[in-house]
Image: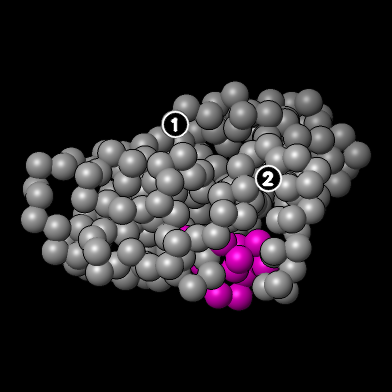
Amino acid sequence: MATARESRAALQLVTGAAVDTSIALLSSVSGTPQARRAALLNGVPEIISYFQEGAAALAVDFYEDERLRAGVTDRTFVTEFVVNDRTVKIRRGVAWASDPLFSDDEAVAGKRLAEVVQLETARPYRDTIVENRRRDPASVGWRRVSSGSGCPFCKALAAKGAVFRESTARFAAHENCHCTAQPVFGKNDTGEEVPAIAYVASRRSRTAAEREAVRGWIAYYE
């Protein structure tokens, strides 16, 4: 059974392969910027979709391993793949990534494309863990697993192995974020509850005061 760190490393291999394949496509297409953008809009979503299946499969395996490791006896729960349809948003991301091609800057286009592909390929792994945790009566929450040397934002959210217990908590991620989620089960693995500010940091929209409070909290980990 893979550990949380090993599963995170496996996800990095999947996202890395997706990025490499997408960059290879960018390098292989020629013609006008409009033609190259069209090729990327046609090909990159398919590349992401292919590797997303692998990311979700890794998460399902890890979730089931964690249930076994925790000694959960209920075998009626079925872990489900979660790959949400984000075609429109992915296409918007690819269009943004291809903008530098119109100024003949393929290096910047490649950097942007890598960010979009990495983030979207990793998303089903996290979604699969978080959504199954919400459905699973045996789970008491989930924790963030970071590299330990990541950005202050990630280190703050993953501090001390703290557990997100609220079912509404979303997994906040940024470009080139290699954090994963780990389901938590049972009384002996509840960990420390995340502070309220962590839930604020995970929200998509925040007030100016909340943003300032989050910045101050994250600065502690810099």
Q: Residue at x 79, y 53 (%)?
A: 212
In the rendered image, residue 148 lying in the magenta stretch gets the answer yes
In the rendered image, residue 192 lying in the magenta stretch gets the answer no
Left/right placement of residue 180 relative to residue 21 reads left
The region drawn magenta spans 143-157
Q: On the rendered image, what quadrant is the C terminus found in?
A: bottom right
Residue 148 screen position, x and y as percent: 55, 75
Residue bearing the label numbered 2: 113
Residue 14 screen position, x and y as percent: 45, 55
Q: On the rendered image, what quadrant is the N terminus found in?
A: bottom left
Left/right placement of residue 93 relative to residue 4 reads right
Vertical arrangement, residue 195 with respect to residue 135, above or below:
below
Left/right placement of residue 176 relative to residue 56 reads right
Asked whether disc 2 touches disc 1, contact meaning CB atoms under 8 Å apart, the reply is no
Residue situated in front as seen by the camera: 123 or 118: 123
Mark 2 residue crowding within 10 angstroms, few (<14) / some (14–19) / many (20+): many
Between the residue at mark 2 and the residue at mark 1, the CA separation in whole angstroms equals: 20 Å
Q: Residue at x 72, y 31 (%)?
A: 95
Left/right placement of residue 38 relative to residue 8 reads right
- Is there any visible trace of residue 204 in the rendered image? yes
The image quarter containing residue 35 is top right
Label 1 sits on a secondary structure element that is loop
- Is there any visible trace of residue 12 in the rendered image? no
Kind of residue at disc 1: Asn
Residue bearing the label numbered 1: 84
